[in-house]
Amino acid sequence: MRLALRIFAALAIPPGAFAQQRILSPAGPAGASLAQLGWFVFILSLVVLAVMWLLIGLVLTRPRGSLEEHEPADTGGGQNWIFIGGFAFPVAILAIMYIAGLDSMSHFPLSGGMNTPAEIRIVGHQWWWELQYFDGTLNQHFITANEIHIPVGRNVDIDLASDDVIHSFWVPALHGKVDLIPGQINRIRIEASHPGVYRGQCAEYCGAEHARMILSVVADTQEDYARWLARMREPGAAPATEEQTQGQAVFMSGGCSVCHTIDGTLAGGTVGPNLTHIGSRGKIAANLLDNNTANLAAWVTHAQALKPDVVMPNMTEFNGDQLRELVVYLESLK
Ligand code: CUA
């Protein structure tokens, strides 16, 4: 009894706890259609299960006569059971599921295919997401990482590419999975029907830190999105205090700039995520850790402990003052 209660407590997920990454809490038309399909298949499976247990129950409880009371096996008795239960019934159930699946796909927001330019290109890296925004004129394009902002209430076409191995874009509340494949561009069209932060996950095993290749889609109101776009188009904020100036110097001389870009500075590395607006992002390390002072310092000095095998090395050459200045500078890059 106690075990049953414990299992029940584990299943009764408190509202909100995992709400962001649940297929059954859709936040857009494609997600809603998939949630419906999920429920339909789940209930259909329960019906099939009930029928099967009913039959098993009948077999177990039916009266057993003597051998003489039964027909010999070679009279063909029971073949209807095999035809209906082993062929007709499964074919009917699978056909129903297939049609339901096709119907679900027909409700996805219709993509214009590759003929229309995408607004965003997402490039998968081991183990983070590069985001290229093509909105506006050429000089308004920008690159950011890991936190995908989209405007609420309209379709957003996203091109998916990969820089190394196969990854998969999956934000369950918004849509199904589409792979990011080296040497090929795939397309997904998503729409969020209400504002919020929707968690996603790389859904194709891509190496040691696959499980920590987390996605975050922030659906903004039209005004918030316009404001965000405008901010992202700006170069990195110039240092405003002595501490930030020192921090920028540490960034430029300490090896950070070899791998990371901060627009408007000499830092132009493309190995790691673009940090031009790192201070504005909610999370760091591909949405693994909250973006706060302690985690930034920990990430700089102990990335290999937090995410073993990540390209980011442990930067242990800074003293306490330099580390603090560096983090203050990063936090100022709003
Ligand atoms: Cu990227 Cu799994």
Image (cartoon, helix red, strand yellow):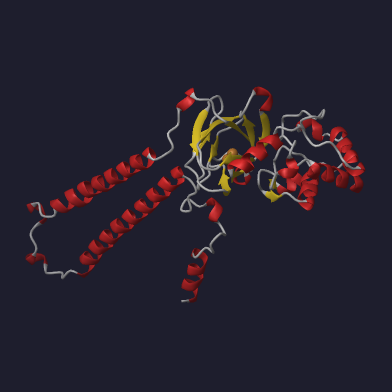
Quadrant in the picture for residue 123: top right
Q: Is residue 238 left or right of residue 147?
A: right
Ligand 1, image quadrant it occupies = top right
The residue closer to the viewer here, 207 or 30, is 30
- Whether residue 43 is visible to the viewer of this picture, yes or no, is yes
**Residue shown at the point (31%, 42%) measured from the top left:** 98
Observer-nearest of 139 and 215: 139
Asked whether the viewer can see residue 148, the reply is: no
Frontmost residue, 225 versus 93: 225
The residue sitting at 48% across, 53% down in the picture is 25
The mark tally for this picture is 0
Left or right, 38 with reference to 225: left
Which quadrant does the C terminus fall into?
Answer: top right
Estimate the x, y position of residue 296 in percent, counting from the top left.
77, 47
Name the spot of residue 111 as percent of width and height, x first: 45, 31
Is 97 located above or below residue 51 in the figure?
above
Residue that lies at the very extreme toward the front in this rendered image: 223
249 relative to 4, above or below: above
Percent x, y for residue 112? 45, 28
Q: Percent from the top left, x then y, of residue 180?
A: 54, 33
